[in-house]
Image (cartoon, grey):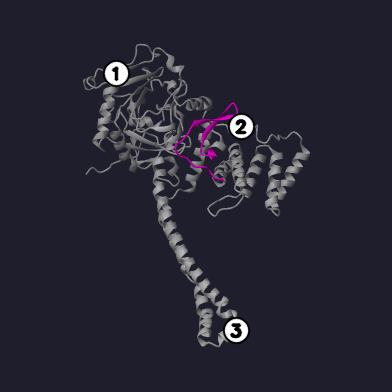
Amino acid sequence: MLSLQWVCFGFGLIASSYICVSVGEMFTSLLNVKEAIVIERKLISYLKTYIDNELDRLEDLKRFHAKVSDLHSGIYDGPAATAMANPLIAFTLIKRLQSEWLNLVHSNEASENTQALRSGFEAVEASLPKLEDLQGAAKGLMRLQDVYALQVGSLARGRFQRAARGEPVDVYRPTVSVHLSGDDCFLVGKVAYEQGDYYHSVLWLEESVRLFRVAGGGWSPENQGTLEDALDHLAFSHFKAGNVSYALSLSQELLHHDPMNGRVLQNVEKYEKLLVESTSLPISEGGGMRRPNSTYLRTRTLYERLCQTQGSQPKHYENHRLYCDSFTNGDPGLLLQPIRREVLSLQPYVVLYHNFITDKEAENIKTLSQQGLRRSVVASGEKQETADYRISKSAWLKDTVHPIIGQMDRRIARLTGLNVRSPYGEYLQVVNYGIGGHYEPHFDHATSASSPVFKLKTGNRVATFMIYLSSVEAGGSTAFIYANFSVPVVENAALFWWNLHRNGGGDENTLHAGCPVLVGDKWVANKWIHEHGQEFQRRCGLNLED
């Protein structure tokens, strides 16, 4: 039997120590989210057992209650002296009061049932999502909201819609979905609130308040928040956003529910004073709020527009120089079975190879990678670290793991004509995206001399070969920012582009991004090919500018 081997591998460098499993990373891989279903099924079973045991216990209580009630409505209903004249009746009364009621009231059955439920919970507790997972999932929803311009109210109704001319329009209609509760929306808004992101907290907390009101403001034991909590957070969010008038109104509503809340009373006094002292404060009820600026994403508008097109750019594809053909690359192995090539762009040169991989091969590669999946990292100087702008997990597979990896390498070499063997090609990186999983605009090639890419001592990444191992229902396109086009996920196809010019300089037009996955489970495999070893495969041009 083949044993699974995997290595933590970054930028072509074997380094088993720098990536570690940390708490709160379930949200970064949909594979792990799916595994959580099995865990909840166990909890459902534990809860069912608890309910059954409690029902049995309550049936015993009801039986005892009925027995005693019958005695009091029958035998004891007449003259007490007559009933107690019977020593059997007198004995059973004394026994009940001295023994049976004591056993009933001090029974351990209820606590034993509760303890059994808690023990079942504790048995799986280590595998449950952490607080970081809940926060990460909430941020994923807000990311999808932003990138695809989705309405929060529609998301709460289980729909993916944006506004067009004042009317909701479906971005995607899922085959299965759920409605969000007031508590669900409260938790998303609270994550934004705790980050000081009052743009998002207002939108989500507004929806939370609306849903709590529709539900009558009642509390459920599984909920973390209440209508009062949502009003409290929403009022302060509006205040921080500059909307003092609405903050006052919400605080006054909150006082109807909790009139003795000293902190809210102080806030009301503060808001009233501010409104009296200044008439220049905005009271627009949130209409003028803007999204927080990104500190690292300068191309946000273009990036999001390309993601929203989901690969549909008719004007781009009107270029008569773009074409499709059956490609052999002059390789004897492809002459009898050429591959369908679609040239998507000339500057940069980007091609899509259809049906590069079979369904079975894709599933095998995903299976091989599962035990090695770790949170994806990005370059930070000479080091690597996790980042919110890359949400996924990845694993690195050597060609010795399974013959299929070597087959992929040979197939890539035939199509590209490049030397992809280690160290000239990095090990195959398999990536699974998480909730709203994405990778914001970046270059695959190193842009700094201190980059870990150069630790292999085989030069920069000259080319990228990316294989789509799965399909998605919506989102997840690969967007080329400066080239102004995006490529939708095409199952079993592979995308190839040159990262460097022939003179070795980086091609800025290869700035690209993995758009957030709206609905679906996205898997890709990346093969990065380095400069060294390609001297005769991709020669330098005569023009220094090429």
Identify the residue at horizontal 60%, vertical 28% (top origin).
166
Residue pointed to by mark 3: 80
| Percent coordinates x, y for residue 209 in the rendering | 62, 44
| Percent coordinates x, y for residue 325 in the rendering | 32, 17
Q: Which mark is residue 6?
A: none
Q: How crowded is mark 3: few (under 14 residues within 10 Å), some or many (20 or more)?
A: few
Foreground of the two, 264 or 81: 81
Q: Which of marks 3 and 1 is nearer the N terminus?
A: 3
Q: Which of marks 2 and 3 is nearer the N terminus?
A: 3
Q: Count every numbered label the image shows and give the total.
A: 3
Q: The magenta stretch spans which residues? A: 155-181
Amino acid type of the residue tagged 2 in the rendering = Arg
> Is residue 461 placed above or below 119 in the rendered structure?
above
Q: Residues within 10 Å of mark 1 (few under 14, many from 20)?
A: some
Whether residue 275 is visible to the viewer of this picture, yes or no, is yes
Q: Does the magenta stretch include residue 122?
A: no
Whether residue 421 is visible to the viewer of this picture, yes or no, is no
Residue pointed to by mark 1: 326
Identify the residue at horizontal 49%, vertical 48% (top origin).
131
Amino acid type of the residue tagged 3 in the rendering = Ala
Query: Which quarter shows the N terminus?
Result: top left
Residue pointed to by mark 2: 290
Q: Helix, strand, or loop for circle 1?
A: strand
Residue 398 placement, left or right of 65: left
Q: Helix, strand, or loop for circle 2?
A: loop
Identify the residue at horizontal 74%, vertical 46% (top origin).
269
